[in-house]
Amino acid sequence: MKPFRMFGRSIRDAFRSVFRNFSLSLASISCITITLIIVAIALLASLNVDNFAKVIKEDVTIVVFVDRDVDDDGIKKIEANLKRIENISTIDYKSKAELRKEMQASSSILDATMKDWSEEENPLKATFQVKVKEIEQIEDTATTIEKMDGVDSVNYGKTMVNRFLSAFKVIEKGTIIAVILLVLVTVFLIVNTIKLTIFSRKREISIMRLVGAGNFSIKMPFVVEGMILGIIGSIIPILIVIYGYYAFYQHFDGQIYSPLIRLIVPEPFIYWISLTVLAIGIVVGMLGSYQAVRKYLKI
């Protein structure tokens, strides 16, 4: 029961301290709020970029062009060989006739050009449209397919895919590093802000020492105070995440310029981000207070 009583007293003393030292508490809360807003935006951007990459990866298709002289048995053999490749997830075959119909339906000019073609005059090649499981291995997969008997050529937009992969890797790493740096900066700022609060209460801490209070019982109110500051400082960033991201999603109708660049659906995404921001606020507040007490006052 003693630890519970101590924790209860720490909460009471922490709330009193927040209001007693309101100007310094406000400085800490403002510091947490501003940094968490930036952290929240970085998290939203990072996860949406990851979603963009995922959508593009799922959309990338290897088009396998079949030799014109391959018969139905050869088509079946190629399909069987494709199914043996581990990195292939889906295979969709389209004959010359099917491709011709699709092209005719897509354009009146093409329809006028192709409608009089006989089966023998059709210059199109039958294709297999292949999607892969791991896009990072798409080049090896395409090379393997190209070496198969009956395959004329393959195409998957190699240059564009490589550029996308390189760009997304840089952006993903950049946003992760930015979030980590922002959290570290927040801890540093809070340590220095709370240090001022603690310095103004050195007499109070000295009295606690004189009456026999241990290091843990002295530190606890400050750590709880940091937790309270973190919670209060998280309120505005959470509101920005919930209402701001929802408005942003509605404004762009769930995508940015292209269906490939789709935003993550707000619910439950915004709630998970809000919980993450709250957790970061609490941890940063507690850690900042703890470091201030331990390092700067050498308790």
Image (cartoon, grey):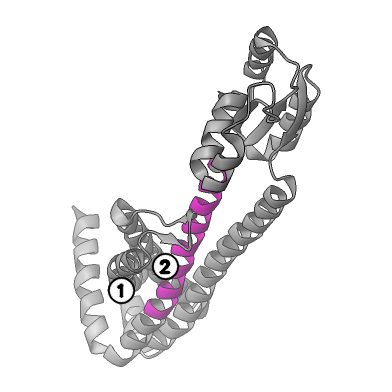
Tag 1 residue: 225
Tell me which amino acid carries mark 1: Glu
Instruction: Please indicate whether residue 5 sits to the left or right of residue 113 in the image.
Output: left
Camera-side residue of 295 and 257: 257
| Placement of the C terminus among the 4 image quadrants | bottom left
Question: Residue at the location (52% across, 57% down)?
Answer: 49
**In the rendered structure, does residue 135 fall within the stretch colored magenta?**
no
Task: Pick the residue in front: 219 or 85.
Answer: 85
Label 2 vs label 1, nearer the camera: 2
Name the residue that disc number 2 marks: 40
In the rendered image of this protein, does residue 114 appear above or below residue 22? above
Could you tell me if residue 125 is visible in this image? yes
Q: Residue 123: horizontal and vertical position, in percent?
A: 71, 30
Residue 48 lies within the magenta run: yes
Q: Alpha carbon of mark 2 to alpha carbon of mark 1: how far?
A: 23 Å
Write down the quadrant of residue 290 in the picture.
Answer: bottom left
- Neighbourhood count class around disc 1 (C-alpha, 10 Å): few under 14, some 14–19, many 20 upward: many
Q: Residue furthest right?
A: 147
Q: Position of residue 5 (x, y in %)?
A: 18, 60
* Depicted 155 relative to depicted 78: above or below: below
Residue 288 x/y as whole percent: 44, 72
Can I make out residue 287 in this image?
no
Q: Residues within 10 Å of mark 2 (few under 14, many from 20)?
A: many
**Where is 269 relative to 224, above or below?**
above
Nearer to me, 118 or 11: 118
The residue drawn where x is 40% and y is 74% is 37
Q: Which residues are magenta?
A: 33-58
Query: Could you say where residue 53 lies in the image, as x and y percent from the top left?
Result: 56, 50
Rendered residue at 40%/54% (across/down): 264
